[in-house]
Each structure stands twice: as C-alpha cells, then as structure tokens.
Amino acid sequence: DAMVIQNPRYQVTQFGKPVTLSCSQTLNHNVMYWYQQKSSQAPKLLFHYYDKDFNNEADTPDNFQSRRPNTSFCFLDIRSPGLGDAAMYLCATSRDQARGYEQYFGPGTRLTVT
Amino acid sequence: DQQVKQNSPSLSVQEGRISILNCDYTNSMFDYFLWYKKYPAEGPTFLISISSIKDKNEDGRFTVFLNKSAKHLSLHIVPSQPGDSAVYFCAASPIFSSGNTGKLIFGQGTTLQVKP
C-alpha cells in the first residue's frame, strides 16, 4: 500500500542534543510538509518542499531545519532541542493541487526532550 | 492569531443520531476547506472537503456545509456510528499563490465520542 512512513514513532532526546526525524513516502507526491502539534493544539506548519524548493513559514524558529535529498525522503533536524520543542511531529505529502489540497499524513513522531 | 477555530473541544452523541461539528474562520482569503479525522496513534486522514464556490458537499454519511458570509463551516455525520469516535480537525487553505502550495491551516480539533 502506498503510504507515508515516519521513523522513529517515539524519540527521546536530551536538552540541546541534535535530533533528526525522518519521513518517507511511496506515493510519489511532489510536495512534502512538516507540522508540529503540541498537546490539544492545532497542527502547525513548519515548512514544506515543493519538489526541491524549500518554503519556510515565517514563524518557524531557526532551530528547525529540513532536508529533502530525493522525492521519497524528507528529514526534520532540530539543532538544539529545548523543552518547548516536545511535541508530535507530523509529515504529510500531497500531489500539488491535483486533489484540492488533500494531504496524506504519516502516523507522527512523538518527541520527548529531557 | 488563530485563523481557524473549533470552539468545542469535545462532543458526545448517541449511536444513530446526528453529529454536528463546527468550525469558524477569520480569513476571507481561504478558498478550500477540509475535514480530517484522527484516531489515536495514527496520523490525520482526509475525510471530506468543500470549495469556497459551493455551500454543500456530501459523501455518504458525511456532509459539509459552508456559510461564507458567517465564515462558518460544519460537518454533519448521520447516522453516527461508534467507529466515528475520533478527533476531527477542520482545515483551510488560502488562495493559491507562490509559496502557498497546498498550505493548510488547522483548527485545534474536536473529540467526538459516539456512544453505543
């Protein structure tokens, strides 16, 4: 089945220790997104890639970076995690606007910062 | 500044009755609205959408209504089933422009519980 896969599902890191979350997709979609969702809050878009073009949201902290080495994979790097970065991180994909902005989500990675 | 709001954190209905989930938005530049459903330990899954040129879209038991003048949309589920118990997110997309490809702005979600 075509899908969006996120690894790991649960990640524990120490305060200030860099961490990388990964996302892969078998849908061959050209757009990939990273969202941050804190408890009982709305998922918040951090950035997205349209093909190789990177689009950063204006309020995304510099501490958050992303890489997309190919169509299938996208990484979220948190350079120096703080306690406030503990959240669920959701990866999503879409085939540009062909389906009316429908996005396909992975199961998420729950990040804990100790 | 929350542009998409779901003011009811939770809703409980009896099986077989109608569930109505509400969503309000503030930005008149949104041109597409979507509802997502999320089960525990899973990512959100697309449920139904509506373009701003329509006021109703129906798909089986699910109907979304859009009232542009009130900047309000609602999701009706009828009849409700226990398997519908989940968190429902409303999302909106601004009119396409460079850098806004498929961008979604989410509400904070409403937890629906359907009791047998």
Image (cartoon, coloured by chain):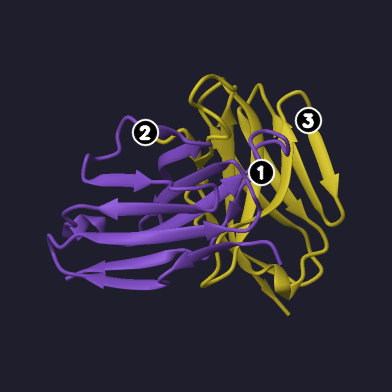
Marks 1 and 3: in contact by CB < 8 Å? no
The answer to whether A77 appears left or right of A34 in the picture is: left
Q: Nearer the viewer, residue B24 or B44?
A: B44
Badge 1 and badge 2 both on one subunit: yes
At mark 2, the secondary structure is loop
In the rendered view of the protein, which quadrant contains the N terminus of chain A? Answer: bottom right
Q: Picture quarter containing residue B115?
A: bottom right
Residue sticking out furthest to the right: B60
Chain ID of residue with mark 1: A
Q: Colour of chain B?
A: yellow
Which amino acid type is marked by label 2? Glu
Q: Residue at x 63, y 62 (%)?
A: A3
| Chain for disc number 3 | B
Q: Position of residue B63 (x, y in %)?
A: 79, 47
- Does B104 appear above or below A35? above
A3 in relation to A51, above or below: below
Where residue A89 sits, quadrant-wise, is bottom left
Residue situated furthest bottom in the rendering? B116
Q: Is residue B27 left or right of residue A87?
A: right
Circle 2 is placed at which residue position? A57
Residue corresponding to mark 1: A102
Shade representing chain A: purple
Q: Which mark is residue B55?
A: 3
Disc 3 to disc 1, C-alpha distance: 19 Å
- Mark 2: few/some/many CA within 10 Å (<14, 14-19, 20+): some
